[in-house]
Amino acid sequence: MLINRTSLIIALFLCFGSTAFRGTNTANYIEKHKTLAIELMREFSIPASLILGVAVVESGAGTSVLSRKFHNHFGIVGKNFNAMSKLGRRSHYKEYESYEDSYRHFCEVVSRKKFYPSLRTNPDPADWISALQKSGYAVAASTWSNRVNQAIKKHNLTEIDFFLDPLNEIAQLEVTPK
């Protein structure tokens, strides 16, 4: 009886402990990349919440092999000449010099999509997710879009789209009437 209670307590601790760690890890990841996402939002007029939401999902908040070995935070496919030496196998995922390069390339990819001009100043990440899903960005599109939407909501990422910086400049997107 004592062993069963001890086992149960340990199992519960491990379950809730890993969940708490995952939440902390994601919060740290968002905090680390928030400034870059805001800069890219200003440059490309893509909501920072979308940029971070996709990155959180695609990179496992920076814990995936792709993000750690290749600085690929968005699951972008491309040539990779170092995969054999880094992974011991071939990979069709692109390698970047830095996470900044990965973030920038994601925004460049999105800005070349057909839907981009019509959404360029739209601050609603759900509209962007839907357009990305329809454009074939993700393989498991409906699951992917649900996960990105959940990440944005769970971590209140839309607040970042309206983040006030120390110079009191509003980082929000231009809003045009729909």
Image (tube, grey):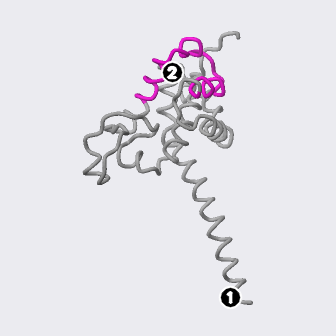
Q: Observer-nearest residue: 36 or 152?
A: 152
Q: Position of residue 107 (x, y in %)?
A: 46, 25
**Residue type marked 2:** Arg
**Image vertical order of residue 175 relative to residue 68, above or below:** above
Q: In which quarter of the image is the N terminus?
A: bottom right
Q: Position of residue 62 (x, y in %)?
A: 47, 47
Give the secondary structure at mark 1: helix
**Residue type marked 1:** Ile
Indicate which disc, 2 or 1, sits on the residue closer to the N terminus: 1
Give the secondary structure at mark 2: helix
Q: Observer-nearest residue: 42 or 107?
A: 107
The verdict on residue 148 being magenta is no
Q: Which mark is residue 3?
A: 1
Q: Observer-nearest residue: 160 or 76?
A: 76
Q: Mark 2 points at which residue?
A: 42
In magenta, the rendered stretch is 104-133
Question: Magenta region, mostly helix, strand or loop?
Answer: helix
Residue at image coords 61%, 14%: 174
